[in-house]
Amino acid sequence: MAAVTATRLRGRTGETLDAVQFGGARMIVTRRGRPAAALVPVADLQLLEGFEDGLDAAAADEAASDPDNQERIPWEHVKAASRALTAADRADAEDIERVLADPDEEWTPLEDVLAEAERLP
């Protein structure tokens, strides 16, 4: 899989998207030498989401058939959990915006990215 830095991606967005959309390329976008995101064709994403949906449905079926899960959960508890998740999602979005605003991104060769990933615990 090819790697591209965020800085290089900014300068070659159209060319990179063409390679992904029309050429079926899969690319890792790096920031400071570390994998940050992946660009994949829409068909790959749809396949992954379909797989995840299948896993979610199987987990829901299993949970619904578990006798320990037959107790009702008060709506107030569900709402509180939902608010907490929303706050976490907002914090993640703010982190992403902060990182995207960094103009100091540089290219990192794929070999360096893979070597760094192997050193991680």
Image (cartoon, helix red, strand yellow):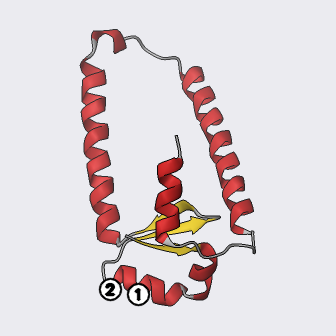
Residue 121 circle label = none
How many tags in the picture? 2
**Few, some or many residues within 10 Å of mark 1 (<14, 14–19, 20+):** few
The spot of residue 102 in percent (x, y) is 75, 69
Asked if labels 2 and 1 touch by Cβ distance under 8 angstroms, the answer is yes
74, 21: nearer the viewer: 21
Q: Residue at the spot x=29%, y=22% of the render? A: 64
Secondary-structure class at tag 1 = helix
Query: Against 87, is 107 above or below?
Result: below
Query: Against 28, is 120 above or below?
Result: above
32, 83: nearer the viewer: 32
Q: Residue at the spot x=53%, y=56% of the render? A: 116
Q: Quadrant of the N terminus?
A: bottom left
In-image side of 99 versus 9 (left or right): right
Q: Name the quadrant containing residue 108.
A: bottom right
Secondary-structure class at tag 2 = loop
Residue linked to disc 2: 22
Name the amino acid type tagged 2.
Answer: Phe
Residue linked to disc 1: 18
Name the amino acid type tagged 1.
Answer: Asp
The spot of residue 54 in percent (x, y) is 25, 44
Q: Name the quadrant containing residue 67.
A: top left
Q: Residue at the spot x=31%, y=23% of the render? A: 63
The spot of residue 95 in percent (x, y) is 70, 54
The spot of residue 90 in percent (x, y) is 68, 48
The Cα–Cα distance between marks 1 and 2, rounded to whole angstroms, is 5 Å
**Few, some or many residues within 10 Å of mark 2 (<14, 14–19, 20+):** few
